[in-house]
């Protein structure tokens, strides 16, 4: 596709429910990032993949958060036993090259509301 | 709909005037900087970038200035238009795999 695609655009989950958020990066992009953006705040780093390898998951807030990218393209961010504080926009970004100074392209995000 | 910039600093500018948005970054090892524009309900959109070996870069209606001595970035928008209304974030790439770290955003409001 032309850009980074995320689905669903909106998700309402009951507290305690598990959710899965999908990211389709730009084809051929090596690097993939997940960010969490609370209302009125800047995006906060969650995790990074280079191809299928998850090289950094230091930003994941708890062990309820899990991300995967098994074939080095599509990625899924899973949140188990959702809590109200998980309500945020989850952004995915991809970049063509792993280490050179190039821009990252962001998707429109998935807005998660936990009720 | 909900606003991205409910709690962010706000800059109000008259249409046609120039805007200057400032940003301080923290990591002296960062070597690549980007300005992103985020409209409500959308993801951040690339505006302009600059590498640490430069102190100025110009694009279409936008200029980024980098002062490494005081770790400061600014984004200048010439002849601001209503479509420029958004939240603007500076960001820096750092680390071995170039993680993008966002600064505090600024909400730009253009007054027609």
Image: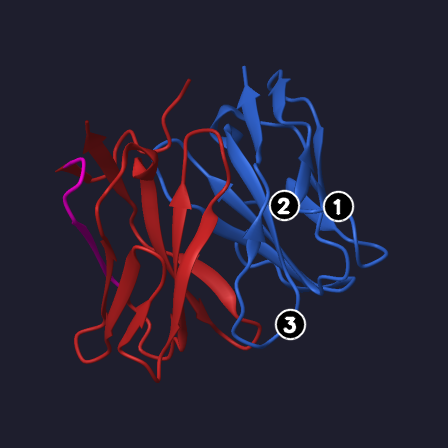
Give the side of residue B48 with respect to residue A61, left or right: left
Q: Same subunit under labels 3 and 2? A: yes
Farthest residue, direction right: A71
Residue A71 vs residue B47: left or right?
right
Whether residue A79 appears in this view of the structure is no
Same chain for the residues under marks 2 and 1 in the image: yes
Question: Is A6 situated left or right of B73 in this image?
Answer: right
The residue wearing badge 1 is A1
On the image, numbered disc 3 is attached to which residue? A98
Task: Report the residue at 66% width, 46% height from top.
Answer: A4
* Residue A108 left/right relative to A3: left
Mark 1 residue element: loop
Provide the residue span drawn in magenta.
B14-24
Chain at numbered mark 1: A
Q: Residue B12 in the image: x percent, y percent?
A: 15, 36
**Residue at 84% across / 54% down in the picture?**
A70
- Report x, y in % for residue B71: 23, 72
Q: Which mark is residue A63?
A: 2
Q: Residue at x 53, y 47 (%)?
A: A35
* Quadrant assignment, res A24: top right
């Amino acid at each position: 596709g032309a850009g980074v695609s995320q689905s669903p655009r909106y998700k309402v989950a009951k507290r305690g429910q598990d959710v899965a958020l999908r990211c389709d990066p730009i084809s051929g992009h090596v690097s993939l990032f997940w960010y969490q953006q609370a209302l009125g705040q800047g995006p906060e780093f969650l995790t990074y993949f280079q191809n299928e390898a998850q090289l950094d998951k230091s930003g994941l807030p708890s062990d309820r958060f899990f991300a995967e990218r098994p074939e080095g393209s599509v990625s899924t961010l899973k949140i188990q036993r959702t809590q109200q504080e998980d309500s945020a926009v989850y952004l995915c970004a991809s970049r063509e090259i792993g280490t050179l100074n190039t821009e990252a392209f962001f998707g429109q995000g998935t807005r998660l509301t936990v009720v | 709909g909900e606003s991205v910039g409910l709690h962010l600093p706000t800059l109000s500018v008259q249409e046609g005037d120039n805007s200057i948005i400032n940003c301080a970054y923290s990591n002296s090892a960062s070597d690549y900087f980007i300005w992103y524009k985020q409209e409500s309900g959308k993801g951040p959109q690339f505006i302009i970038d600059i590498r640490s070996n430069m102190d100025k870069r110009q694009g279409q209606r936008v200029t980024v200035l980098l002062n490494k001595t005081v770790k400061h970035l600014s984004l200048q928008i010439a002849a601001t238009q209503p479509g420029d209304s958004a939240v603007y974030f500076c960001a820096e790439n750092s680390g071995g795999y170039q993680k993008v770290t966002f600064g505090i955003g600024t909400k730009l409001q253009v007054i027609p």
